[in-house]
Amino acid sequence: MRADPAGVLTGVHYLDGDFACGEGAMAAGCRFVAGYPITPSTEVVERIARRFPRMGGTFVQMEDELASMAAVVGASWTGTKSMTVTSGPGFSLMMENIGLAVMMETPCVVVNVQRGGPSTGLPTMVGQADMMQARWGSHGDYELIALCPQSPQEAFDLTIDAFNLSEQYRVPVLVMMDECVGHMTEKVIVRPAEDIEVVPRRLTAAPRGEFQPYRVDGRPVPEFARAGDGYRFHTTGLTHDERGYPVMNAECQEKCVRRLVDKIRGSAEQIVRFEEEGTEGADIVVVCYGITARVARLAVHLARERGVKAGVLRLVVVWPFPEQRIRELARHIRAFVVPEINYGQIVLEVERCAAGQAAVVPVPHGGGGVHDPSAICQSILRAAQ
Amino acid sequence: MSRTEIRITGFGGQGVVLAGYIIGRACAIEAGRHATLIQSFGPEARGSACSATLAVCDTEVLYPYIQRPDIFVVMSGEGYERYRAELKDDGVLIYEKDLVHPTPGAPDKAPLRLREGPAGPRAYGIPSTRIAESLGRAMVQNIVMVGFFTAVTQLVSRAQMRAAVQASVPPGTEELNLKAFDAGCAFFDTTYGEAAQSPALPASG
Amino acid sequence: MNTGNAELGTTGAGPGPADAAPEEHPIAPYVRMDRMPHIWCPTCGIGTVVKCFATALGETGVDLDKVAVVSGIGCTGRVAGYMKLDGFHTTHGRAIPFATGLKLGRPELHVTVFSGDGDLVGIGGNHFIHAARRNMDLLVILVNNFIYGMTGGQNAPTTPLTAKTSTMPFGNFERPFNLAHLAASCGASYVARWTCLHVRQLTWGLKDAIQRRGFRFVEVIAPCSTLYARLNKLGTGFNLMQFYHDNAEVRHGADTREVDIGFQDKIVCGKFVDDPRPTFLEMMDEHYRKILGDKYVPMPPAGGFIPDPDSCGNPDPNRHRDGAAASPRGPTP
Ligand SMILES: Cc1ncc(C[n+]2csc(CCOP(=O)(O)OP(=O)(O)O)c2C)c(N)n1
Ligand code: SF4
Ligand SMILES: [Mg+2]
């Protein structure tokens, strides 16, 4: 359906990534946000707190991130699109209830404006070291979706996409922004509401009494009933059957968790999204995401000037990981170069998919700044030798 | 790929970030170029030295931070001391005349040609605070500086920058801010004159 | 997950909702009979509280379609799963913030939090005090059994001094919370305490609380017959009930500073606080109306859900079951 115009600030703006993310959420139809202040993410909720009272939205500053995440899951069960926003330390606190959202199949969006870690780390400076936490941070086996914007424009666009994916797959979707993108101001175009496609919550049409909250009938995701619509359903973080009732045995675990995992794995090829530049016939492919993708493209230009056939694969969706494409490329290229603002996270995935068919060269950066393009270029040149 | 790097610095409360925002907006929206603004955050932004940087490019800005600015706008002595060394050798210094006292040809980097006149001045001073006060509000000092900046650098046209000022200041203050902008431009015209050709902007990268 | 004896209680005997033929039981409309027998031990007090809550709901005549129950984790935490209402069994300690989201996401809901002492004021204590401070419009029913039941009888922030628990084998030396005083001093607009022995008073008390607004805290003293009683050699559930009978006294309006509970000491019950101050949502509405005037667009009572105009077949979410349309979404500014 088309976006609700009340949330769409159509026009050409000069906005930072945090504000753009907030605008994306409102354009996507988000009407509930719970959050707890943390640099460098707070501007997202500050923007929303100012605009929500004019569009029927409610922002509440909770007592901590545990509460913020729990409130978001609760609000989503009313059919209200919901989001929370945080950075590393708060992201850690949200993990248990992100797992709850996965288990209850609750659509919601979590924005992590990544800063340097571990612990309190570098509150005001960039990092990309929460990428594995995004994938594995909550306990148990699960799959979810994570997106990485590289600019304020993408902070806007991908936040809308995050809401849409969360509705489509009934899964929490993470917007893994970084401080650099969050705090950089650039031109952001907000399309008119009628040009913004949003995925509405798919409500069940089942008669009351017949509805089962986790019955799928062969579809990847079940139909949704809002709290208060008279379905009187039950949902739980325990392993459950189609009625949403807890069942404590291995068979039910297999059925319940298998489907949660498969609904993402089985659609991974539709969900994955990446952009390629110059990978055709390349010897070296730089795999990158977020702010590092921009710096890496500069490095690739430098390397090409030196005669290296280098290309870029930019991950827009990081989780699920584009395994298939990396495998294909591995058969044709000499090496992957993987710059990221951490000591080696996504590079592990690249290594796994390359499976020895191509070399994999990490270009780590501890955080607090972005890579020097010439350092990435050096790695490309070395890998090409 | 012509790229212009700018640093704007001053003390908290001078509107450093707003000045950067207006210049960035003028480049990115009014002039259709690409402009990435980064502002200093956290304790630094609240302390005495406050700073914003801009990378302006005809194509997408890939590297968001600046390395050596082509233009250094400085509104406090502390900001000058802190960042003077990074200004490009052939860069342009724009400074608050009453608050900043550039040291010509100081031995530590940042050689400055402070000759003012038709021969091509590289450093341009303006008593922007005094001008703002004469307009009734010291607060618009940053906008006076933006006007002066526009006249000095010709990075975008005066009309484009004016539109960015209008779109960026709090509603209800447009008139005063545009007056401040015009005063900044006028100071350039009278002090550095028509004859003093503004330098073509140095381009890096 | 249940390292205590709770799982042994699946025979369904005892005071819980399963002790009668499902079809005929008066609380059948409120309870998921298809989930019986429940997991609670025979003579556990939790079932009685559920029964009283169900009766209270029935007597108030509130639209059950609009009632949601949220629980955390624990023996009491299972309540959300047994009531035939929209029921949310969440994570340990987070029932109150989850419920806050439900309430703010659809303001017309009656949201009840039903959970244990460890859940609500141990791990979830921070949420408890803040929800009370905000006067968030929630009814919080806390079953205080002085112990962590589900995990096998560990010390709780409510365990009376000297009482034995599995992690305080020599007796508890930590001072427990006086929950009524905690809630009252944090700003709860309604604070009461009952025991699960006093079924009539408890039912009346819950009914009273359902009919108020704001953060309503009802503490119900209920025996953990299996663990607390055994560890402290207090006999059976019956003996505990007898103790409540002899030692509970009703003192409406009692000063909450004076109602703390010692080990095997008297239990002061009653309605301590009933101060209908504005709730979070009322304060927010009034404030925005004052500051923003016509520009303020409140979330509709039916929530911030934005229906798909093209969808057919789905129930109109802005329509109550009785056909009354909820207030429409506000105009777009
Ligand atoms: C994060 C987390 N920590 C610990 C537990 C284990 N746990 C489950 S229930 C419980 C205590 C419940 O005590 P209470 O709330 O008093 O409920 P009761 O069983 O006594 O009704 C604990 C510690 C958990 N489920 N989650
Ligand atoms: S609280 Fe105690 S008596 Fe009740 S079910 Fe749990 S372990 Fe059994
Ligand atoms: Mg307990």
Image (cartoon, coloured by chain):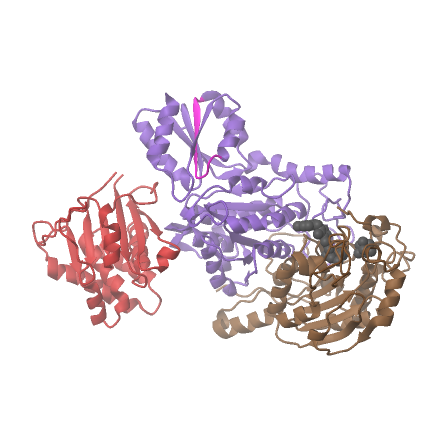
| Place of residue A182 in the rendered image (x, y in percent of width and height, measured from the top left) | 43, 50
Q: Quadrant of residue B10?
A: bottom left
For chain B, the rendered hue is: red
Left/right placement of residue A322 relative to residue A306 reads right
Q: Colour of chain A?
A: purple
How far across and how far down the image is residue C124, in percent? 65, 58
Query: Which residue is located at x 57 percent, y 60 percent?
Result: A63
Q: Position of residue C79 (x, y in %)?
A: 77, 57
* Residue closer to the observer: B198 or B125: B125
Does residue C114 lie above or below A153 as drawn? below
Vertical order, A334 against C251 (above or below): above
Is C90 in the magenta?
Answer: no
Q: Residue C326: horizontal and vertical position, in percent?
A: 64, 66
Indicate yes or no whether the magenta region holds residue A335: yes
The answer to whether residue A313 is seen in the rendering is: no
Residue B25 visible in the current orientation: yes
Q: Report the side of B105 relative to A231 (left or right).
A: left
- How many discs appear? 0
Q: Is residue B68 above or below residue C277?
A: above
Image quarter for ligand 3: bottom right
Residue nearest the viewer, comparing C125 with A176: C125
Q: Which residues are magenta?
A: A333-344
> In terms of depth relative to the viewer, which is nearer, C177 or A62?
C177
| Left or right for A366, reference C210 | left
Q: Chain C's shade in the image?
A: brown
